[in-house]
Image (cartoon, rainbow, N blue to C red):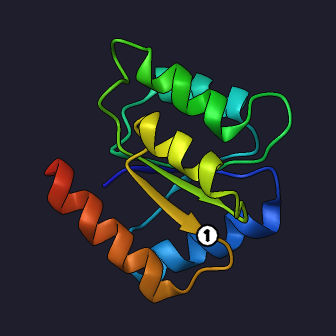
């Protein structure tokens, strides 16, 4: 499975990449902002987008909107990650067709469960 990890904090990208690698998902790509991620998504085929919600320039919600509005990307599974605790905001993301949502901090087991659920829902390997 080809995964793109997007977070403006390099330490969070490193943690996520380490977790993914320990779960057997090798060589995830990474982007430091939504704008960079959108360019990468349009240049290469990805099976999953894991993105932070709060980022400068193009945040996770805006990135999700652009992905869902793109004829070539609209079916891409998107796992949103955030420390957001506003239930209305989270429900809005779900209505915006986010595939999964994890609250920071999260454990390896939580990530594993989310990935398994997304794979079963979307039939990606």
Tell me which corner region of the image, top left, top right, bottom left or bottom right, holds residue 36.
top right
- Residue sitting farthest toward the top: 71
Above or below: residue 61 compared with residue 17: above
State the SS at label 1: strand
Q: Is residue 52 left or right of residue 122?
A: right
68 and 96: which is toward the camera: 96
Location of residue 25 in the rendering, given as x and y in whole percent from the top left corner:
38, 68
Q: Is residue 28 left or right of residue 18?
A: left
User: For the view shown, which residue lies furthest in the front direction?
Assistant: 88
Res. 18 in view: yes
- As drawn, 121 above or below 65: below
Q: Residues within 10 Å of mark 1 (few under 14, many from 20)?
A: some
Q: Residue 59, percent across and down?
A: 73, 36
Q: Residue at x 70, y 69 (%)?
A: 14
Q: Residue 96 at what x, y percent from top left?
A: 47, 33
Residue 5 in view of the camera: no
| Residue 54 horizontal/vertical position (percent) | 77, 47
Q: Which image quarter is the C terminus in?
A: bottom left
Q: Quadrant of residue 10?
A: bottom right
> Where's the N terminus, which quadrant?
bottom left
Query: Residue at point 73% right, 65% down?
Result: 83
Residue for badge 1: 103
């Amino acid at each position: 499975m080809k995964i793109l990890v997007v977070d403006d904090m390099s330490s969070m990208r490193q943690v996520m990449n380490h977790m993914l690698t320990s779960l057997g998902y090798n060589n995830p790509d990474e982007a430091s902002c939504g704008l960079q991620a959108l360019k990468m998504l349009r240049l290469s085929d990805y099976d999953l987008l894991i993105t932070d919600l709060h980022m400068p320039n193009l945040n996770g919600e805006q990135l999700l909107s652009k992905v869902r509005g793109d004829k070539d990307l609209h079916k891409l599974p998107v796992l949103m990650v955030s420390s957001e605790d506003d239930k209305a905001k989270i429900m809005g993301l779900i209505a915006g067709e986010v595939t999964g949502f994890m609250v920071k901090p999260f454990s390896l087991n939580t990530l594993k469960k989310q990935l398994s659920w997304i794979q079963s829902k979307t039939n990606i390997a």
